[in-house]
Image: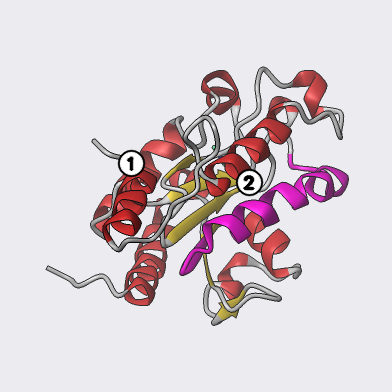
Amino acid sequence: MPSISDLRRQMLEDLGIDVWLFRDNTTRDENYWRSLQNKVQTCQSCALSKSRTQTVFGSGNAQAELLLIGEAPGAEEDRQGQPFVGKAGKLLNAMLFSIGLTRDQVYICNVLKCRPPNNRNPLPAEVESCASFLSAQIEFIKPKVILALGRFAAHSLLQTEAPVYKMRENNNVLPGAEIPVVVTYHPASLLRNPEQKAQSWQDLCKVSQLLGIKKG
Ligand code: URA
């Protein structure tokens, strides 16, 4: 299947617009994204670089309209190098499916790119040292909507300490960018507290509405 950048290249060529490629046939965008991935992969800015098996950059469609942001890789993510592949990830897939989306149609990443040992909470210094990677991802993807999964993602994005139940009722916007941020419970929290699922469904409906997804 042709990639989005192949299709875009073809479309520009069809319009008679010259497309400049790098020697290895990639575009500036692809090179930027790869170099960002490489920076994350080789990052040693904090102590998590010593305990990780590998970094978890993110996965999905880097031109997606919906960007989902979680907290940090867990044990399974650290093993596989992909976000949300454990139990919480299975629930996340089902949540996406409920609004007619698959993982290939969205982009999924975390605030931290490395696993905190024993799944402890991220430390403020770790969040800070990873912040430029997340900002670069947001700036590159330019999503129409961000879905913040849980307290850590919401706090890092919105620079607040408010509890999730309050943030999920607000019309949040990413500071410095006009991107709506829908806040919802983390899928791991939904596994522990299934009674939160009804509210999480409302949050997904809000996302669906902001994206202009038609019901049916
Ligand atoms: N929890 C997260 O916040 N992110 C993952 O990638 C997995 C579990």
- How crowded is the residue under tag 2: few (<14 C-alpha within 10 Å), some, or many (20+)? many
The C terminus is located in which quarter?
bottom left
Would you say residue 114 is visible in this rendering? no
Badge 2 amino acid? Glu
Image check: 190 left or right of 121?
left
Whether residue 128 appears in magenta in the rendering, the answer is: yes
- Residue 31 picture location, percent across and down: 59, 40
Determine the image quadrant of residue 116.
top right
Quadrant holding the N terminus? top left
Question: How many neighbours does mark 1 have within 10 angstroms: few (below 14), some (14-19), or many (20 or more)?
Answer: few
Look at mark 1 in the image and give the residue it sits on.
Answer: 3
Q: Which residue is drawn at 52% across and 36% down?
A: 83
Does 196 appear above or below 177?
above
- Disc marking residue 200: none
Q: How many labels does the image show?
A: 2
**Does 20 appear in magenta?**
no
Does mark 2's beta carbon lie closer than 8 Å to ligand 1? yes
User: Could you give the CA–CA distance between mark 2 and mark 1, rounded to whole angstroms?
Assistant: 29 Å
Give the extent of the magenta segment: 121-147
For discs 2 and 1, the disc positioned in front in the rendered view? 1
- At numbered mark 1, what does the secondary structure look like: helix, strand or loop? loop
Q: Give the residue displayed 88% in from the left and 46% down from the top.
A: 125
Q: Which of 52 and 13 is in front in this view?
A: 13
Q: Name the residue under label 2.
A: 71
The image's colouring method is secondary structure
Query: Would residue 215 appear left or right of 81 to someone viewing this image?
Result: left
Residue at 60% from the left image edge and 66% from the top image edge: 164
- Residue 51, quarter of picture: top right
Q: Where is residue 181 in the image (x, y as percent from the top left)?
A: 55, 70
Give the dominant element type of the magenta stretch: helix, strand or loop.
helix
